[in-house]
Image (tube, coloured by chain):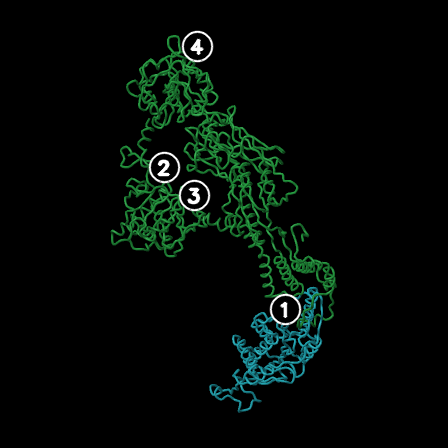
Amino acid sequence: MNLLGPLGFAAPGLLLGLVALPILWLILRAVPPAPIRRRFPGVALLLGLSDEAQQADRTPWWLMLLRMLAVAALIVGFAGPVLNPQTPRTGTGPLLILADGTWADAPDWTARADRIAALLAEAGRAGRPVALAVSTDLAPVPLDFTDAAAAAQTVANLQPHPWLPDAASIADWAAAQKGDFDTFWLSDGLARDSRDSLLAALEAHGKVSVFQTPRPVLALRPARFADGKVTVAATRTPTGLPLETPVAAIGPDPAGVERQLATATLSFAAGSATADVALDLPTELRNRVTRFELPGLRSAAAISLTDDTLKRRRVALIGASGESEALQLLSPLFYLRQALAPSADLIDGTVSDVLQAKPDVIILADVPTLAKGEDAAMLDWVNKGGLLVRFAGPRTAAADLGQLTEDPLLPVRLRAGGRSIGGAMSWGEPKKLAPFPAASPFFGLKVPDDVTVSTQVMAQPDPTLAQRVIAQLADGTPLVTRKDQGNGQVVLFHVTANAQWSTLPLSGLFVQMLERLAISTRTTPPKAEDLAGTTWQPDKVLDAYGTLHDAADLPGVKGEVLAAAVPGPALPPGLYAGDKRRLAVNTIAEDTTLAPAEWPARIPVEGLQQAREVVLKGWVLGAALLLLLIDIIASLAIGGRLRGPRAHVAVVLLAGLLALPHPAQAQQNGAVPTEASDAFAIRATTSVVLAHVLTGDATVDDTAQAGLYGLSVTLANRSSVEPGLPIGINIETDELAFFPLLYWPITAGEAMPSRAAYAKLNRYLHSGGMILFDTRDGDIAGFGGATPEGRRLQAIAAGLDIPPLAPIPPDHVLTRTFYLLQDFPGRYDNPDVWAEAAPPDAAQAQGMPFRELNDGVTPVVIGGNDWAAAWAMGQNGQFLYPVGRGQAGDRQREIALRFGVNLVMNALTGNYKSDQVHVPALLERLGQ
Amino acid sequence: MSDATLLRSAAEALAAPLPPLLAEAEHLATTVILGEHGRRRAGLGETFWQYRPAMSHDEARSIDWRRSARSDATFVQDKEWQIAQSVMLWVDRAAAMGFASSRDLPSKAARARTLALACAILLARGGERVGLMGAELPPRRGGAQLARMAELLAEDDSGDYGAPSAMGLLPHARAVFVSDFLGDIDAVESALLQAADRGVRGALLQVLDPQEEAFPFDGRTIFESMSGSLRHETLKAADLRTRYLDRLAQRKDRLAHLARTTGWQFSTHHTDTPPAAALLWLFTALERHA
């Protein structure tokens, strides 16, 4: 059936008619155009004149060509041309449609879903029962073959997963299958080991056809830190032409807003499968990087999450002063330095100096007491989240530290002196360590035999002692104690940081313990024994599209599983947190290589691109008709009949014919910005424009329009805001980002926004937009669901991401952005107007009648005072609706207008007015 | 004869704005017929010209006693010499004149008849005697003559092209030929020469359709005369245009030359231009001393 590439014909026999075209050419050529009979008195003057040239009795060649084309188009048209004709797939019996559903499928998952839908439709026509499966999510139960139409309902439920199919689950699944079925396998095109076993399992049940399109796949490997630089590597398949792709480091900026912190370009050489680029980032910046990504690629493989391995903590080491003449190896800080230098930034100095440097950890090695001011500063720092690690030593033992009362900077009360064991002057052997208890952060670490403790400081027995011990000796005396202090922690090693009192600093366990306490971080991924016994809580997980989601509702993961770092249903790629440490599980491991899948020759492989069958008959016949129409006009022109009014008609017809194809083009690329949307954007952005949401109720919409017009006029008169004409927007179709403020009157019969509109509204609210909801029922109802409008507002707002609300407090910034107000009346004066609640810990500003409320413009203001009606102004400046009565009414309208001005000011300037709380402090600072 | 009435009223309407046309009369010694033209000399007439002393040959009854009584001599009242001019009209009523290129334009015949009758009305208003050439309508005066003329003008000729004949042309009269002059030019020439021999002066007005001037044709065409007696086929009408226009220009030249040699006036009028211009031209052409 295929004759010319993707073109096929329903009745190719008719094409033989094209052979007749040359004959037709000769016949048509010999027939001159028919003459016109024309009455003309001037004929007397014409008598005797003869034609100069004789060739005009033949039809001009171009007209002939036109006619030939028209006839050819007719013949071709009736032959039934079809673009991309579908060869029907044969087959009967149950059919399994299996998609790989890995992260590699994610970028074009919709295309796959479409393909699945098309295959389902085909199977439906063939009457085959169908089952759908995704290889990354195989349940070990027999497939449930259902009607194709029913299966089509579930196509939307199929989602790719950010991991690869796992051999064990494939084996379980294959074992559970019974009966014969054919398989259509939509492959993601990447080679992997589990593919063969799955193929074997499927072939045991029936024929397998594969749908696979070769396409480039890029994957970002985890970033590594070495030699002061972060190395980001990526791998790709196929390895063909040279390729340059940007890679971005993403993280919060100092203000906490996530943004690109650095970018680099990955350059793949021709034929090379990998590329890497080294980023030289300052420590400050590097510690903030949360992930690297290949911008624009919607796939989990384009995201590489970073964890503690990339971070370097600032550790301040403070030793006892005045020991400079001691041997280096006896310095209490020597072993700490050795242990921490590879993985942390070390700070030296006095307590007051290092506190300025904002360290993550301060280690006090045998420093029993701090100076008077320093201990308060230290305590403050710990309370704010610092980790203070103290080591004991002779001085600590000698100083009667916290014997009677608990020192906030010590986890336990200490007994005077301490004890020595196994020395020349004491009984017993040096003590070994007991295995770590399950509640300890060290749980799972192997205790080496050669670690012995000969001297230690002892804790006073105390009711809280047991829960503070995180490591103890074999005899049950505490070795490491810890307590929470404020947001921070205080840890005490009951031995010295050098090898004087114990061999602990000499062993590898010391480093592991420092790591577990999150004092140091490791630059290599942890091994199973490192994580043994720990439980990690997923913090953020990636989906297959590379989007991060909160994972608070996922169960914890065992450290051993995490150490294997093989993403799967039990271990979705993401960020895992455990006891102050974070570990990332990435989709792509460091040694992952990508290769295109190879299929045995017996398996038919089809392209995934499903070319849609396009019947061209109508188009070709239409073209023929068009050509014939042009021929009519051309013939008239040639025959001299195209004069006078006919000529105008012909010109109009011709112009119409030529203009005909353009709308079709516009329909084809409907998604691109149209002129209309451009005009809308220009109109909305040439000046500040207030907008109201179109409710579909003409009266309400008109009132809102007039209200915003009145408010705009008021703003222009009274402030430097000079808004343009307000715009009514359709939240389904119009872009919201242009508007600082949306006025949304609620009607009882208002349609619920669609899912896409909700997404748009939430994006608008998150990006600083403000919506004023107006239920317009302040005269009959308080705030709440009492009225139909109120209930509708509740239904609509349920889908919006709105923070906790509270009635506007008297010190809210809305009360003073432009005018000083305490009421927010509209046409009705109902005091219940709600806005985002202030944080509960907002403190009273010094000397000011209001609290220090800094950031966060309220995204919504909700009330029912029908503000638009109070603001509504006709084109002649006349207010349209009455407000109140007499002078009190005028006052109420004035306050309503002032509220509008305040609202717009708040939307435009944010909390500028609130920040003025700090003016006295700023002035004072300037004065210095 | 509503046709004639219509024609009459159209012509009256056209003639209304113009002052009475007084055709100049000269060389009328032989065709003296009393009319209302004062000749600015004493002679037969009805209006007073001058008093002169009575001569011996004056009859006694011609003495104006009222004047004579105021003096001693006797006076005779001289009258102004008054004559009337005869204007003969010929309007081509052949089929060729029935052509109109567009529905919006009048046919050439309609325009020619209107112009001719308007001219006749003007002349009659000035006291001239108007008639149609040939034996149909000898020059006479008065409204009845105009009504009769309108009736005759409304009739059509059967021939393809018309030609004037000098028959019935009074010597030293005035004549107006209105036609498209697309037919046989020789007939026109002989008529013109005969008229000139008799001392007749006048005007030739060629009425043409704009299409006949432009020849906006193209493609394969068969041109037919109005009655179909003549036909010419061409395959490419656009090629003929220049040659046709050449011939038309020659025809006009010939007519203009004839007019010059015979002391006549010649002009071309197109049916898409206002008729008043043509009437004005006729007015001045008839007033002019030949």
Residue A855's mark? 2
Give the chain of mark 3.
A
Do tag 3 and tag 4 residues touch (Cβ < 8 Å)?
no
Earlier residue among tags 2 and 3: 3
Above-or-below relation of B121 to A725 = below
Do tag 1 and tag 4 residues touch (Cβ < 8 Å)?
no
Residue A667: horizontal and vertical position, in percent?
Answer: 54, 53
**What secondary structure is found at the residue carrying circle 1?**
helix
Q: Identity of the amino acid at label 4?
A: Leu
Q: Dot 2, how many residues are within 10 Å of its Cα: few (below 14), some (14-19), or many (20+)?
A: few
Earlier residue among tags 2 and 4: 4
Q: Identity of the amino acid at label 1?
A: Gln
Per the image, the residue denoted by label 4 is A327
Per the image, the residue denoted by label 1 is B211
Per the image, the residue denoted by label 3 is A763
Rounded to the nearest angstrom, the CA distance separating label 2 from label 4 is: 54 Å
